[in-house]
Amino acid sequence: KLIMMSNVQRKRFKNIKAEKDFTYMNIASLLKELTGALKKGSPVRLSLSDIEIIDLTAIQLLISAKRSFVKADVPLELNFNSNDEISLLISNCGFKSLAETKTV
């Protein structure tokens, strides 16, 4: 049986992990990794599970990443099984559907 795989299925997800201190002081490397993956059309699995501190800059980065990956038709999968307050904050910032589907 021949199974046709889409480009997304052929590509492996790039695993990226956010720092515990997910603030403007620590997002430069994550931004670089996300931008590089997006330019290559590589699907990304972004783990936010270890976040202990988050600020508005990090939330803006997540919103921008979501929009950019959707626009480019590149999958972005978020895992944010961090503490309840941070998960609620991320959900309330427009990522509520991601909590259920985990893929943008």
Image (cartoon, rainbow, N blue to C red):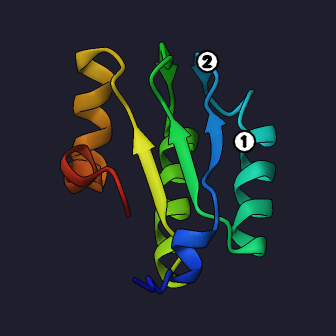
Return the residue found at the far front.
1
Kindly identify the amino acid type of the residue bearing the numbered disc 1.
Leu
Tell me the quarter of the image containing the N terminus: bottom left
Question: Foreground mark, 2 or 1?
Answer: 1
Classify residue 102 as left or right of residue 20. left
Q: Are marks 2 and 1 in contact (CB under 8 Å)?
A: no
Disc ID at residue 67: none
Residue annotated with mark 2 = 21
Which residue is painted at 69% across and 68% down in the image?
A: 38
In the structure shown, which secondary structural element does the residue marked by tag 1 occupy? helix
In the structure shown, which secondary structural element does the residue marked by tag 2 occupy? strand
Residue 40 picture location, percent across and down: 77, 72
Residue 72 picture location, percent across and down: 57, 82
Q: CA distance from mark 2 to mark 1?
A: 12 Å
Taking depth in this image into account, of 24 and 83 the one nearest to the observer is: 83
Disc nearer the start of the sequence (2/1): 2
Mark 2: few/some/many CA within 10 Å (<14, 14-19, 20+): some
Kindly identify the amino acid type of the residue bearing the numbered disc 2.
Asp
Which residue is painted at 32% across and 39% down in the image?
A: 90
Residue annotated with mark 1 = 30
